[in-house]
């Protein structure tokens, strides 16, 4: 009897690049999404450098940019937009919105990316272990997934963030958000692992004397990588929105550290007199979430065509 060898990944090598180029030609929105993602990723990495281009720091007050006789409203049109303040200023404080949006991108996206990394690593490890080893391991991990998913996650996050005192809020948010996100990835990986562990190339590796950890690393993990990458890209917008929700509710990043959710929460009181203060962080949040959603949708079609749309 001849055992078949491991088939090449459908989205690997030159075939993957051809598919990517075809998707770029077919979806002009994907090019825009990639550009937006690259822009905000650059903000995350180089926020101090990019923010300094405007000439103002995120905590610098410019009292000359607001009118004390009008309740601290920005002087000038569109919330104080000028050559000195490219996106206007905050009411009352006069802090530069451009600098705060750039530094807010660093905080918001850092939390989203780090929490996503924790979720993906923990979920992939748990899903592969549950699917490959089965038996008691599968039972324990599956019940743990069910238990974690049964919690009302947003309420529990709010409670945990409200109780915590004198801690690094950014690190705490990363851990809290990551705590409730891993079961979704684990379920996807578990199902994929169950379908892979009885393939001919896995049986051939087992017969050839490969141990379980070698099989998991060389045969199972590459097989689940495509769906996990696609799922990860689709999950990042949810992480960004979760951070914004917590900051909006006042239990996330605390002032004076800027984040988009916190800026939106503070701007609600001024949306009728200074709509730019509300629009600037809201548009940034909307564009980022939309760009990652479109990018994740395209990656799902490329890397996991059976899970995508026809």
Image (tube, rainbow, N blue to C red):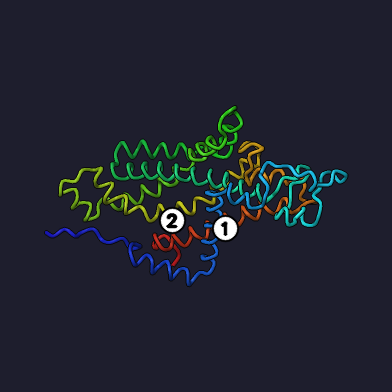
Residue at image coords 47%, 68%: 24
Image quarter of the N terminus: bottom left
- The residue carrying mark 1 is 290
Q: Which sits in the foreground, 216 or 184?
A: 216
> Residue 230, which numbered label?
2
From the viewer's perspective, is residue 271 above or below residue 2? above
Q: Which sits in the foreground, 185 or 286?
A: 286
Question: Outermost residue, right direction?
Answer: 69
In the structure shown, which secondary structural element does the residue marked by tag 1 occupy? Answer: helix
Image quarter of the C terminus: bottom left
From the viewer's perspective, is residue 289 above or below residue 309? above
Q: Which quadrant holds residue 299?
A: bottom left
Residue at image coords 57%, 44%: 107
Residue 41 location, x and y as percent? 53, 53
Residue 253 location, x and y as percent? 61, 38
Residue 90 location, x and y as percent? 74, 46
The residues tagged by marks 1 and 2 sit, at their Cα atoms, a distance apart of 15 Å
First in residue order: circle 1 vs circle 2: 2
Residue at image coords 53%, 34%: 172
In the structure shown, which secondary structural element does the residue marked by tag 2 occupy? Answer: helix
> Residue 31, which numbered label?
none
Residues packed near mark 1 inside 10 Å, few (<14), some (14 to 19) or many (20 plus) = some
**In this rendering, position of residue 259 left or right of residue 186:** right
Query: Is label 1 in contact with label 2 (beta carbons under 8 Å)?
Result: no
From the viewer's perspective, is residue 48 above or below residue 290? above
**In this rendering, position of residue 148 left or right of residue 76:** left
From the viewer's perspective, is residue 136 above or below residue 23? above
Residue at image coords 59%, 51%: 50
């Amino acid at each position: 009897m001849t055992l078949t060898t491991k088939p090449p990944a459908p989205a690997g090598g030159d075939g993957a690049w051809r598919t990517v180029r075809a998707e770029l030609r077919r979806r002009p929105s994907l090019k825009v999404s990639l550009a937006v993602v690259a822009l905000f990723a650059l903000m995350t990495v180089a926020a101090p450098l990019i923010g300094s281009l405007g000439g103002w720091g995120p905590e610098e007050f410019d009292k000359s940019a607001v009118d004390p006789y009008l309740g601290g409203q920005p002087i000038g049109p569109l919330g104080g937009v000028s050559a000195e303040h490219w996106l206007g200023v905050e009411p009352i404080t006069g802090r530069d919105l451009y600098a705060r949006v750039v530094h807010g991108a660093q905080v918001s996206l850092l939390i989203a990316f780090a929490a996503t990394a924790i979720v993906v690593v923990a979920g992939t490890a748990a899903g592969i272990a549950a699917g490959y080893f089965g038996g008691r391991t599968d039972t324990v991990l599956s019940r743990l997934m069910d238990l974690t998913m049964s919690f009302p996650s947003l309420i529990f996050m709010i409670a945990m963030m409200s109780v915590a005192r004198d801690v690094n809020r950014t690190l705490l948010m990363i851990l809290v958000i990551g705590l409730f996100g891993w079961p979704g990835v684990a379920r996807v990986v578990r199902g994929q692992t169950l379908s892979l562990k009885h393939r001919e190339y896995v049986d051939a590796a087992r017969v050839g004397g490969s141990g379980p950890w070698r099989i998991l690393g060389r045969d199972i993990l590459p097989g689940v990588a495509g769906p996990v990458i696609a799922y990860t890209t689709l999950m990042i917008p949810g992480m960004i929105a979760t951070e914004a929700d917590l900051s909006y509710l006042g239990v996330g990043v605390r002032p004076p550290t800027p984040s988009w959710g916190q800026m939106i929460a503070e701007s609600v009181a001024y949306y009728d007199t200074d709509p730019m203060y509300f629009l600037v962080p809201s548009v940034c949040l909307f564009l980022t979430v939309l760009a990652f959603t479109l990018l994740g949708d395209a990656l799902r079609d490329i890397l996991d065509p059976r899970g995508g749309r026809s």
